Image (cartoon, rainbow, N blue to C red):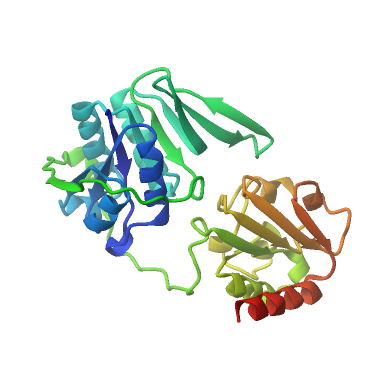
Amino acid sequence: MTEVLVLIEAPQGKVTKPSLELLTIARSIGEPSAVVFGEADASVLAEYGAEKIYTYDDAAYGDFLVAPKAEALAALVAEKSPAAVLAPASTEGKEISARVALKTDSGWIGDAVDVSVDGGTITTTQSVFAGNFTVQSQVSKGAPIITVKPNSVTPEAASGAGTVEAVSFDVPDSAKTVKIVSSEARQSTGRPELTEAAIVVSGGRGTGGDFSEVEAFADSLGAAVGASRAAVDSGWKPHTFQVGQTGKTVSPQLYVANGISGAIQHRAGMQTSKTIVAVNKDDEAPIFELVDFGVVGDLKTVLPQATEAITQRKG
């Protein structure tokens, strides 16, 4: 089978869920090979189908921004001529993959929500123009370089050889022009990462700045907490919580919008969610045009009842 390179993200050595999703997708295309900069649990990668694991441990990959990683991955693509290169649709994943596409003269597709193969031709599905259109795309030149949104597939284990191969690459000085002088790990909230969560519960202007009901409901579901632009602009939540065109794009299995009108700015960041539920007092709110289930009511009344019911069922 033809090799498929998968860019792995593993902060503090822990392989992310989107990376496991990519390995699952890669198996439908060819033979998955994980590409790791730094450390990652090889046994986990093998458990999800990685036949080979290319590791790079040069300090340059951690001391500088994405350029060294892009240079190394481009060289690997040129050497291996893979059927495709898959990367997470994260900020870093998008920048590295785009640079690799440019350096290898290959086509680049971003934010895919589905990847399929028919007769050896790889086709991706994307949601574009603020989610108003769904398109299918194919690369016409080079190896397809594709970033995939989190939660596009469910990670499925499939034993791979997991053969580790340390790769040596001489990072050029031109890739070391921007150095990281300090970094600080974000404090954990105990909730899932917003862009990776299978369930996201968001609050908007209708919360009045009090997210306690939203957070309690999210915790009962083991969900991440998001916010609309109105809530962020009002100072109720930091920008890292914002879901929307100028915030984060999420595609969870379940998205619950509370007190959010459903402006196009917000819809662009969440309408590829598999199931959408909205709670809003205004029965004419635009969000109801998009949802699978809608509740017309005050979130401060509805959410506590829902939280109590879920807690009782779990008990």
Where 70 falls versus 81 (above or below)?
A: below
Relative horizontal placement of residue 223, taking residue 260 as reference (left or right):
left
**259 vs 4, nearest the viewer:** 4
Q: Residue at x 62, y 49 (%)?
A: 273
Image location (x, y in percent) of residue 42: 22, 55
Asked if one can make out residue 248 in the rendered structure from this viewpoint, the answer is yes
Q: Is residue 156 above or below residue 220?
A: above
Towards the viewer: 98 or 47: 47
Q: Residue 186 in the image: x percent, y percent?
A: 41, 69
Residue 258 image position (x, y, % from top left): 73, 64
Total count of labels: 0
Task: Establish if 188 lies above or below 12.
Answer: below
Screen quadrant of the C terminus? bottom right
User: Residue 176's x, y, as percent?
Assistant: 22, 45
Judged from this view, the residue extending furthest toward the right is 283
Q: Residue placed at 43% from the left, 73% from the top?
A: 187
Q: Nearer the viewer, residue 15 or 132?
A: 15
Q: Is residue 38 left or right of residue 189?
A: left
Residue in the image at 47% along x and 31% along y: 116
Q: Residue 167 or 170: which is nearer the viewer? A: 167
The picture quadrant where one finds residue 165 is top left
Q: Is residue 59 left or right of residue 276?
A: left
Location of the N terminus by quadrant is top left
